[in-house]
Structures are given as structure tokens and as C-alpha cells.
Image (cartoon, helix red, strand yellow):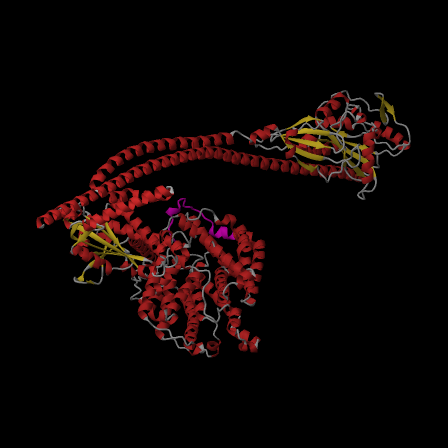
Amino acid sequence: MGGSSGTDSTDNLSNNVGQHARLREREDSKLDDSMQFEANNEQEVIVEDDGIEKAAISCLRFFVLFLMIGATIGAGLVTWNFLSSQEHADFNKEFDVIAEDIKQLSYSRMTDRVDDFASLANTLMGLAINSNTKWPFFTDSNFPMIASNYLSTTGAGLVFLAPLVQDGEAKEKWANYSQQNQGWIAEGFEFTQQPPLLNVSDIYPTIFRRSNGENVPEEGPGPFLPHWQSFPPDDSGLSNFNLLSDPHYNEVFNSVVESKGIAMTDFLDVTNKGLLELGGPDIQYLVTIQPHSLFLTPVFKDSTYQEVVAILNSDVSWLPIFARGSDEDIPPVDVVIDEGCQRKITIRVTAQKTDFIGFEDFHDSAYDDFEVAFPFAPNVPSHHLAGANCSYTIRVFPTQEFWDAYHTRTPGSTAGVIASAFFFIGIVFYLYDAAVHFRQKRILKVAAQSEKILSVLYPKTIRDRLFGIEEKKERELKRAPTTKRKQMKEDLIKASRYQLKHFIKSSPSNHSDSLEGFGSKPIADLFLNATVLFADISGFTAWSSVREPAQVFTLLETVYRAFDTIAKRKKVFKVETVGDCYVAVTGLPEPTKAHAAIMAGFARDCVSRFVDLVSVLETTLGPDTGDLGIRVGMHSGPVTAGVLRGDKSRFQLFGDTVNTAARIESTGMRNRIQVSEETGDLLAAAGKVHWLRSRDEAVTAKGKGKLHTYWLLTKAEERAEMEAAADISADRAVIQEQINQAPLDIKTCTLEEVEALLSPKVRRLCSWNVDVMTKLLRQIVAHRNSSDAVHSSNEEVLSYREAEIRDQYMVLDEVVEIIPLPGFDPRIYRERQDPEEVQLPDAVVDQMRLYVACLATLYRDNAFHNFEHASHVMMSVSKLLSRIVSADDVLNADENAAMSTNFQWSIHDHTYGITSDPMTQFSVILAALVHDLDHLGVSNSQLIKEKHKLAKVFKDKSVAEQNSIVLAWDILMDERFQDFRRTIYTAPFELERFRQLMANTVLATDIFDKQLNSLRRKRWDLAFHGAVSDLESEDTRDNVNRKATIVIEHLIQASDVSHTMQHWHIYCKWNERLFKEMTAAYKAGRLTFDPAEKWYEGEIGFFDNYVIPLAKKLKECGVFGVASDEYLNYAIENRREWEEKGQSFVADLVRKHAPKNILHSPRASTTPKRNKRRMSLTVGYMSKVDAA
């Protein structure tokens, strides 16, 4: 029993094992079937996807093909249409110009002929009156000469006189008179110096008409109009022919007599038999080949123009009226002259000639749409047989030649070229597509082989991820039918579950394959010579805290992509990016000796690129983006580098060099590159020492203690240093050369020593200037003492700012549109200290005297631009300042003004803040004294032409004016004038305002600088002529300050030429001095023209275009009181006297100062020397100039 049981148990166990095995085999079989089904489905999906992709690519190719064809056709049509439109527009424009030209020419010529014809009739009337002739018995021997002049002026071919014989009795007298006075015919031929075409015989004995081809004496009561004196003289038997016997002429005659004015007949042709029959075959033939008409004008008995006693006749040839007479090669146009009722003629007009086409409208009807019509000479009355409502109309049409000249084959040929270019691009595209397709087939073939290899090396799930098959299956699962999709899903779930279950239940030994990679040796190495860079975005944390994630990543991606591009170009190895920190290394994996220099160049490029990028990105990422900076740190040394395996394996750096580079970066500054001492030594050895600047203070690094580091100059810093060093060194040398020319030193010389160099007159002028400046300086101190404002006397800050301004040589850049002036404070006004109570320290007065004396020595011995002239200008400025309406006047005029809520600005508006601010007055006075300092006696344009060293310093802009300010300022900044300066200003804001006033005032004297003049015009128009809306939208203070700036500039400009607006003798004195100075420049070859040649006319132009308009603007400012009227009146009077006496005055100047020996080379001349006693003002700043 027991054995049986054991046997049964064994059998049962065997059966169970067998059953389990069979079940396992069946599961494996099902799994294999499932996997096979999955593989088959996968293959089907791949094949179907390939078919869809191929169909899509084919459709895309055909679409691109049709798109290229459409683009080719479209480009050709657009080009053709555009060029054709351009040609047509040119055609219309040119035709309209020619038509308008024809209109204006015809009108002008007909008007001139009418005027000349009327003038001839008036001349004959005057001759008859002077000779006491009784009409109709008038024959004048001067007729050939008068008529000849008329014909040559108007281009007419014939003119003749027909006196009016009123009745039969007068006709008999006329018969006798005409026989006795027919000698005019021979006189006419004698005048023309040509023999008659026919034998001149006696004229017909009486007035006659034509009948059946024969001459018949006229009968009846009259009146009669015999053809009489003519030019050219008549030898065809027309004399005594009664013009009224022609019905056409008779009708026109009646119209002339009735209107008592000029009339023109219609076209003469074979219908005018009465007029043409006597002319013979030649005249009859002439009117058939060229259109003619007749002018008729009455000749009156006297100047009352009431009684008509004769008719003056002249022919009118139509062709010359429309002749253009131009040298241009212009195609012809057709001009149709339409009488309006019956007849028309057509002429063809070109640039050089005019051709008669015929007595019809022969223009090409294809161009009717381009017709330009206008009335012909509407001021000239015409008479037509067809009726009174008929009037001449001129119609202009283009011809075929004109059309062809502006409609060429260029549009078609150009369109063809462009279409061909598009076609060629299409061919290139398809060739490229074929090459890509061929290459892709090769890649697919290699990929298929690679897939076979990967199927052996990687599990299927990894392989599916690599090739994106899982995503394809999911897409296919969505597209499959419901039944098929359900089955596929079940199979995939079964397979996945089996793989997951098998992985989980398998022993750790089964994972050996997945861990096999760690059994190999790690990929790592030690690099002894490498340079590591850390770059961190400064301000990123705060910036990113207010940005969307997409904006943050946009910034990082843009910056890092730019850095990556630079790294590839420089062959720098990018290690990683951690947040906003970028890590890179050189010297590995390929070692190089120049690793430090390469990384330095990379860092400089990255900083420069970063600054550009954040400026551009600010428009898309918002405010403060442009304020972001970048900190860069570099260190060189040994580095351990390798691949740290595991999930997301990465290349990593390890070692002390990496940590030190991170510390160097963290202790750096925004947009600067800090390098360690080790890196600095390597850069110096590589010849890059000029890139390095030692950091003043040592930096403290965690775990490192104190480190000595260097700043590596960025490109912007290096460029700024080079430009600053070059500019300051060169400019200082030039300015110092202008100052330093004699043995006396400003640091040691006394006032007595300086004044000893000056003439007595100049010393007197210096004393007067000091007195004026002293009064204003007292006012500055009094105004400052009355103010509650505490001017902190930070001497260090003030001295630093003075040094900065001293190195600013381009004063022109400091000129502003509006100089800010302080507002009017009524409390300060009421509590102000009396300036007379202010006692200036003796040191201040002595320094001011020394300063003015030094300025005097800097003026050259010019005839005009000298210290005396500067004092004269200063006197005019002082006078005008004294005449400006003051606050006292306002308060006296309105006692309640102080109670006004807007009292401060009501006062300020009257003076624009000038008289309430002594600083402004003092600055303008001092500017007047220094505005021509060191003037070279020639104009700015001549200095620029000569490429003078000063022109280079001041960049060819306002050379003399900027030189004056720089010299005066440089002397003022000397330590010997410390007390004088601290009395003028005590705080940085006062220094800034003082400098601004000096710069604007002195530069205002340059009236030839286009940029400054444009700024002044705009400022004047806005302040005094601007729209109310413009001024209302602006701050009131700015509006008042703008007017104050204008007043200051006009004040100094008027003072600079004040001699033109003063007494005649003062004007003559300074005019002669200016002439003498310019003549001296001409003698030295530094002036291209002799000033004497245009001096008289130039002064008139200067008065008309500058002086008088400037005086009017002084008046228009409304702040100078009676002084503006005084200046304007003197200017007008001096202009008048110059017009009367100027030529004789110039003659005297020429005799006294005429140039004799002229230097032909301007470079051969020398600058007017300063006085031999001129001192040297060595200001000491040359010690700062770099020896290089």
C-alpha cells in the first residue's frame, strides 16, 4: 500500500511535471505565434507605410513641379507687365511734356508776333503824325528799314500797308498821288540790294480790281483799300489793287474796323482767288505747299485810337510757330490745327524741324486716345468765313515712330531671361532631388543592414525606440479596423506582460547581460595642459523669475547655440550647460600648446556675441533683457576627463582646475573676463600680454584664499582703450603745442610778469573785462547765499568731473537743443543779498586778473580776430544783457503779480530765466571773451582744406570755435585758478551748467556749420512759430528754456557782428580790419580768391541775408527792449550808406592793402604769429600723455 502510494505519488508528480511542461510548451508556442503574428503585422505596417510615403513624395514632387512652372510663368508675366507699364508711363510722360511744350511755344510766339505787329502799326502812326501827313497820302522812306526789322524779328515773309480811301473824290486824288510817289518800289529794291524779278514798270494808274483775269478800274462811292507800300518791294503789279474787292478780305476788314483791333484770317488757299490771283503762280503754289494766314491791324490817325486810316497787313506762316528748335533727339508728333468749322491742316513736329503734311487731318487714328487739345492763342482774335463761332484748336497726337521709341522689346526679352532663370533653377532642383533620392536609397540600404546588426545587439524594445517603431504601431493601431485592432492590442499586451514577467522573475544572474558594460575599463584620462572656462549669465535668476518658461528657454537656446557655433569655429570642446552656466575646455581631447590663447579668443567672442544678442532679444523677450550680463572665469592646469557611465551617460571633468575656474568666474564682474595668474602667464607667453590688465585687488576664493587675477580685455574694452589712448594722446599734443610757445610757465609766473608782456591798450582792456566779470561774479555769490540749497562741497567728486571734462575735446557733441535754466524763485528774489555787499576774496580777484591776462596772450596778432575784437563783442553782450526786461519791471508793472498762483513762471516767462540767473550772464560774458581765442586768421574751411592738425583733432567741425573753448577751459582748470573756479561753481551740477552754457554760446558763433544751423532753425520755428498743439504737448519749463537758449545764441551772434549794427565809423573801422586780415591770408596763399573782387557785393549780401534778419530776430524775441530797435536801425542805415559809399571805400582799402606778391601754394604760408611777448601757458596735462 505504501509502495503503491509512493509509486502513485511519483507518477502523479511526473504527470504533473509533464502537464506543466506541456502547458509551458503550449504557452511558448502561443507566444511564438503571437510574436510571429506581431512580426508579420509589423512587416505589413512597414510595407503599407512605405507605400504611403512613396505616394506622398510623388505627390509632393508633382506639386513642386507645377509650382515651379507656375512661378516661371508668373515671374515672366509680372516682369513683362511691370516693364511694359514703365515704358508706357515714360511714353505718356514724355508725350505730355512735348504737348505742353508745343502749347507754351505757340502761345508765346503768337503773343510776341501780335505785340510786334501792333508796335509796327503804332510806329507808322507816329511817323505820319511827325511828318504832318494827311491820310491816305502817306509814304515813308523808312518803311523798308522798319519792315525789315519786323520781318527778321517775327519770321514773317511779307508786310504791306493799305491806306483807306473813303470816296470817289479821294480816289482821284489818290490816282495822282500814287503815280507821283511810286518810287518806293525802287527804293525798296535798293534797300534789299537785290534786282527785281520782273521789270519794274509804272503801277496801274488808279485803284483797280480783277475781273475775268484783267485789271478793271474801280467805280462807285468807295471806300477803297488800295495795296500800297510793301516789303519786300512788290514788282508783281499788286500796287493800287483794291483789297476790298476780295469778299473774304472785305469781311475781315469790316471786323477789324468794328473791333479796332488785330484779326487773323483763316488759311489762305485756292478759295481766296481775289488775293491770290494777282500774286501769280508762285504765290498760288506757295500756299498749297505751306499753310499761311494774314494778320490785319488798324492804323489810327492819332493816339486817340478812334479813326482808322489804314490797314497794316502781314502774312503768318504756321510752320515756324510750332517749331521746337531743340537739339534733343525726340521722335515726331503730329499737330492738327483745326479751324473749328471747315478746314484742318496737319504738320509733323520734331526736335529739329517742322514739316507740312497737308490740308486735312492726317494723324494716325490709332492714337486718338492720347490726344492733347488746347485752344490756339486765345488772346489773338481770328476771323473765319465759316462763321463767328469758329475758333482755332490745336490737337497733338503721337506718331508711330514716337510709339516705337518708347515701346521696345526690352520687357519681352527681360521676361524671357527671368523665365529661363526660373526654368534653370527648376532643372537644378530636380537634378538635386534625383541625387538626394539616389543617396537616400544607399542610406536605406545601409540602414537595413544596420537594423540586422542592431537586432542582434539590442533587445527589441530598445530597437523599437531607436527606430520609432512603437510610435508607428500606435498610429497603425488607431488606423486598423476594430477587430484587427483588438487582436493586435491583445497580442501586444501579452508580449509585453510576458517580457515584464520574465524580467521580474528572472534571477540576478540573468541581468548579467545588461550589466556587462560595466565590466570593461572606464573611458577616462588625465590631461596635464588644459584651460577650463565657466560662463554664467549675470542677473539671470531675477530676470527668469518674471518670465514664462518658454521665454527662459528661448534666451538660453539662443545664447548657447551662438556659443556652440563659436566653439566649433575655435575648436573648443563644450563640456555641458548647467542652468545658465556654460562650461567649456581646451587642450582635450586633442592636446594643444595654445589652449589658453584659444580659450581667451573664444571668451572674447562669446562676450561680444552675448552683448549683441541680448540687445536684439529685448524686442521679443521684454524689458531688462538688454541689461543681462555675462561673467566669465578661466583657469589653466591638469584636468581628469572621461565618460561617467550609467543612466544618461555624460562626459565629465574633475580636478582642482575645474573648481578654481568656477571660483574665478563667481568673483568676476558683469561683461568682463577674469583669468587666473596661471592662465595669464600662459597668455603672456603666447604674446597676448596686451589683452591683460592686472586686477587691483586680490580675490578671495573658497578653499583657495587670496588669488591674484587678471582682467582679459573684451573686444569692446580693447577697442575703447585704443581709441581713447590714441585720441587723447594726439589731441593733447596738438592742444599743448597751441599753448606752449614761450619760456614763462603758468605755474610760476606772476600777474606782473604776464602783464609786462601786454601792450598798455590790452592791459586797459583786461582791467575793463575784469571789472565786468567781477560784478557778475558778485551776483553769483549773492544768489547762492540767498538760496536754501546746500551745495555739498565734495571736492573729490568735483575734481574728478573737472578732469573728465578737461579731456573732452569734441565740444560740438555737447551742444544741446535746450539749455536747462533754474526756475525763478520769488522767495530768493525778495530775500536776495545785495551784490554790492559781497566781498570777493583777494585771491579770487587776483586769479581772475591773471586768467584774463593769460587769455589776452593767447590771441594772435590778427587785424580782426584779436583781443580787442573779443572785448568789443563782450561789451555788446554786456549792453544787450543790461537791456533785457528784468523781474523788477514786471513787479513794478503789476503789483498783484506776486499774489498770482503761477507767479514764479509768470516772472520767468518775461525774461526766459536769463536775468534771474547770474550764472547764465557770467557764462555768456566769458564766452564772448574767449570765442576767438587763438584764432589763426583763416576760416574753418581753409583749415580743413589744409588738413591742419587742429582740423584733425576736431574732426573737421567748428575747428576755431572748439579750439577756443578747449584752450580757455584748459587754462581755467589749472591749479592756480582753484579759488576762481570754486567761486563760479561749488557743486557738480553748477559745473555742468557752466560748461553747457559756455559750449552752446561759443559754438553759436559758427554760423557756417550746416548741422548747427539746422538745429537753430528748427528750435526757432518751434519756439516762436510752432503750432499751439506742439507747444501744449511739451513741458512748460522746456518751452521757456528753449526760448532762453535761442536768446543766448542770438545775443552772442549779434554781438559777434555788432560793428555792423553800430555807428557808421565803427562799422568802417572793423570792416577795414577784416579786409586787411583776409587780404593777408590771400597774400599768404591761404585764401583762394582776392577779397577785393567781391567785397562790395559781399557786404550787401551779408547785410541782406544775415545781419538785418538777425537784428529782426532780436526784435522778435521781445526781451531786448529798445536795444533791438537800435541795432536794427543801425543795420539798415549802414547798409544804405554802404550801398552809396561802399565802392569808394573798397577802392581806398585796395590802395592801402592791395596784395602784391601772392604765394601760390597755401601750404607755403605761415599762421599769423602771436605777439613776440606772448607767454607760454604750460598747463601740465602733457605729463599724462602716453609716450607712445
As drawn, 43 above or below 216: below
- Residue 810 vs residue 1100: left or right? left
User: Is residue 280 in the magenta section?
Assistant: no
* Outermost residue to the front: 1
Tell me which segment is drawn in magenta: 1147-1168
Taking depth in this image into account, of 123 and 705 the one nearest to the observer is 705
Residue in view at x 52 percent, y 59 percent: 1022
Q: Position of residue 1005 (x, y in %)?
A: 46, 58
Taking depth in this image into account, of 1127 and 445 the one nearest to the observer is 445
Can residue 507 be seen by looking at this rendering?
yes
- Residue 371 vs residue 75: left or right? right
User: Is residue 1148 in the magenta section?
Assistant: yes
Taking depth in this image into account, of 440 and 250 the one nearest to the observer is 440
* Snapshot quadrant of residue 423: top left
Q: Position of residue 980 (x, y in %)?
A: 36, 70
As drawn, 206 above or below 1186: above
As drawn, 1037 above or below 898: above
- Residue 379 vs residue 581: left or right? right
Q: Position of residue 1069 (x, y in %)?
A: 50, 59
* Snapshot quadrant of residue 474: top left
- Residue 52 vs residue 531: left or right? right
Q: Position of residue 685 (x, y in %)?
A: 17, 50
Can residue 857 be seen by looking at this rendering?
no
* Outermost residue to the left: 3
